Image (cartoon, coloured by chain):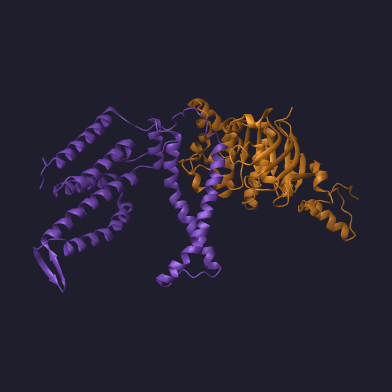
Amino acid sequence: MLRPPDGFYRRLNPVTKLAIALCTAVLAFVVRGWSPPLALLVGVGLIVAGTHLGRAFLPFVLATLPLLASILLINTFLYPGATDTILVIGPLRATGSGLTVAGQASLRILAFALSVAVFALTTPTDDLLADLERRGMGRRGSFVIGSAFQAIPRLATRAREVADSQRARGLDTEGSAWRRIRGIVPLAGPLITGALSEVEERAMALEARAFSAPRRRATIRPMPDSRVQRIGRWLLVGITLALVLATFTGRLALP
Amino acid sequence: MTVLTLQDVRYRYAGASAWALDGIDLAVAPGEVVGLTGANDAGKSTVCLVGAGLAPGAIGGRLEGTVLIDGTPSSELPSYLAAQRCGILFQNATTQLTGTTATVWEEVAFGPRNLGLEVEAIVERVAWALRLARVEHLSGRQPDRLSGGQAQLVALASFLALRPQILVLDEPTSQLDPAGTRLVGETLAGLARDSGTALLIVEHKTDLLESLCTRVLVLEAGRIVLDGPAAAVLADERLAGYGVEAPSRVRLARALRSGGLEPDVALDGRPGR
């Protein structure tokens, strides 16, 4: 019942990919300078090229753009204490130090977002959960995580259904901001009560399928893992910790 | 010997003052296919929850009387043990599926895995359940990409994989179109014939009950008001008064007689011309 993964990166064990994503995210935010986020972006770019993610990757890139634009604008023009003006637009002054901070922050966020995107696009949730459960995570824990992931599209679908049915009864949810805000209340009520009722039904269905049985579940979907990957994971975590420690103690000064 | 027995059962939901079930006596023998019908709020779904040991076990409330699941009082059975004796299929197929599995095969394996079975036993049970529910061809499909009828059959297979002695089906076709209803109906008929699993089917669709059940009960306000062979109960003149529509065969016979015509064959229990 395995779905055949394609490509080297997709074939990696889910925990290996999780370790790569987490270490990338930590390094992107903690280690100072231009070179760490740039190096991470190059790494993520190589993975993207190798996995042929193509267009699937685009929404993740586009989603970061509003945040990056606001970071660039705010830091460049409003960075506190900066005096090295490089441009004046009316009452606003762009500063060199503000632009530097904004550029580094943008690269960090981009590296973080893209590493998470690579993980999400190459690792099915159920693969990760199956592997975590095999490693000893309780069935309740894995089910809660899996349900949380699955609940998002279900809630979105339900929200659309509720909105459509309320519109069919004359609710105006288009137009001015005030109209939209006023339309939220009759949408939120059915959405929340419907979701709660669904939770109760699901809970009963789970009980009816022996979910509370005390025995350990057999693994039916073994995820590929290898000695190389295990060593690689520990090395990656070790290097990340060392870099974080060196950054905090001031021993690491990268350009 | 019965697989499910309710003796003078009264049940009240948590926070409610009225009894949803008020003195129910019901016994289902191994392999028997029993239908249960009645108007909305008659207590049909409550019979399902009580019979499967979920009420009051999982949802609370107050139970009086005796509920025996395969000879053991439901109060002495933890829900995971009750699930292996009495399966329950709800109306809504989508809320019965876990939503966390990648394929139908894994969905059906969810229950046997919970029981802590070895992989070989899980594989054997899943194959058996998929075959019995006639959904072997769906085993590699994603559960959230199934039609309503297919999802209901996958849910059925998921409960069958626990190998219960009796399956309680709470309006299994209520959200299905005629094609989905026919699909589920044919599968249930095959299940009753081939597996020996007893079925307690709650349905408004009396045509379906007539085609599947040997015995039918009618519930009103938490009490059983009719109980007997399916043909006799479903042709009973009092059925409409209990908020139940007679099967199309019976309605046709009545329509013919009201027009002064006598059917050639016995359509409603009365001899034909």
Q: Residue furthest left?
A: A84
Relative placement, left or right, of B43 versus B233 is left
- Residue A175 visible to an observer of this rendering: yes
Q: As rendered, which of A243 and A24 lies closer to the eye?
A: A243
Q: As rendered, which of B105 and A175 lies closer to the eye?
A: A175
Q: Residue furthest bottom?
A: A90
The quadrant where residue B188 appears:
top right
Colour for chain B in the figure = orange
Q: Position of residue A163 (x, y in %)?
A: 50, 63
State the quadrant of the N terminus of chain A.
Answer: top left
Total label count?
0
Q: Position of residue A152 (x, y in %)?
A: 43, 51
Q: Is residue B215 above or below residue B260?
A: above
Residue sitting at x 46%, y 28%: A218
Residue sitting at x 28%, y 30%: A230
The quadrant where residue B135 appears:
top right
Q: Position of residue A202 (x, y in %)?
A: 54, 44
Residue sitting at x 69%, y 39%: B200
Relative placement, left or right, of B107 versus A61 is right
Residue sitting at x 69%, y 41%: B11
Relative placement, left or right, of A205 versus B197 is left
Relative placement, left or right, of A122 versus A33 is right
Q: As rendered, which of B211 and A159 lies closer to the eye?
A: A159
Q: Position of residue A219 (x, y in %)?
A: 43, 30
Colour for chain A in the figure = purple
Q: Is residue A138 above or below residue A48?
A: above
